[in-house]
Amino acid sequence: MIYRDCYEEGWKRLLEAGIEEAALDARLLLEQVCGTDRNTLLAHGDREVSEQEQQAYEAAVARRSRRIPLQQITGCQDFMGLRFAVNEHVLVPRQDTEILVEEVLRELQDGMSVLDLCTGSGCILISLLHYSNWCQGVGADLSPAALELARQNGAALLGQEKQYTFVESDLFERVEGRFDIIVSNPPYIRREVIDTLMPEVREHEPRMALDGGEDGLDFYRRIIAESPAYLNGGGKLYLEIGYDQGDAVQRLLLEQGFREVNVVQDYAGLDRVVSGCWPIRTV
């Protein structure tokens, strides 16, 4: 079978399965299997696809038809210009979270220390360390499987001169020391909403990385209440939030005593990041 025909069969099958971006996913899966790029379909559509490649492609399309996320099939996702390994044990890094990283980078100075709570694939901490100099970082997560993947990503994407570690911890439970910046994209979906999410999320991404409790704010309450004990004076806390949680999280920060509390919108104009500064205490 030639490349173009293989793609069209995959595209039709994904369309029948109700995949919203069937054409794009069919192309990306074919490129993954054949080791090709986006130009191949246009310039070399008559390329012969081997029987082994065809079988591998059909298997990948079958998995995607079952609503397994594309990134779990390809095993990777681009984030902040870096390619991260992903699997079923972590949330797929999303473009919305790049807003969080970009906001931290505005304040991150050389030599600062960073704590990333609920680190998952490590995409936030690794991106921050990659784009800074002489910073130190700790990534904390409760999932051993997620931490194993984060360590793999760190080894692949960070040079040996970067100082970082990943620890198994229920938020701050096993975290030591103080930090200039604490950042987190915690679980924030309201429990009753999870079953209404698209199948790729509710059935194939880890529920513990989604469930934010009855009102979606459980992790924000804990992080905001406990973070002052781990922040240097003048240090900042950055939190990714759901589109309707800006006011609530902002209020939690102010009640805890944070200053300079700010809400930042994403490119769709929706609340996405809340930050606050822990004041320097004077005697």
Image (tube, helix red, strand yellow):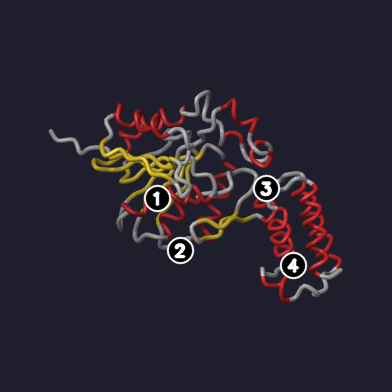
Type of amino acid under label 3: Pro
Viewer-nearest of discs 1 and 4: 4
In three-dimensional space, the C-alpha distance between marks 1 and 3, rounded to whole angstroms, equals: 29 Å
Residue 118 percent coordinates (x, y): 49, 40
Q: Which residue in the protein does label 4 denote?
A: 34
Q: Is 1 on the left or on the right of 22, as rendered? A: right
Q: How far apart are marks 4 and 3 (CA)?
A: 19 Å
The type of residue carrying mark 2 is: Gly
Q: In which quarter of the image is residue 30?
A: bottom right
Determine whether the residue tagged by mark 4 lies in a helix, strand or loop: helix
Q: Please state if 109 lies on the left or on the right of 168 as rendered.
A: left
Q: Name the residue under label 2.
A: 159
Q: Mark 1 points at which residue?
A: 137
Q: Is mark 1 on a helix, strand or loop?
A: strand
Tell me the residue that label 3 is attached to.
69
| Residue drawn at point x = 24 percent, y = 40 percent | 233
Which picture quadrant has residue 53? bottom right
Q: What's under tag 1, amino acid-wise?
A: Gly
**10 Å neighbourhood of mark 4: few (<14), some, or many (≥20)?**
some
Separation of marks 2 and 4 at Cα, in angstroms:
30 Å
Q: In which quarter of the image is the C terminus?
A: top left
Q: Which residue corresponds to the image point at 52% horizontal and 58% vertical from the top-left?
A: 155
Residue drawn at (40%, 43%), measured in percent from left and top? Answer: 183
Q: How far apart are marks 3 and 2 (CA)?
A: 30 Å
Which type of secondary structure does the marked residue at label 3 adopt? loop
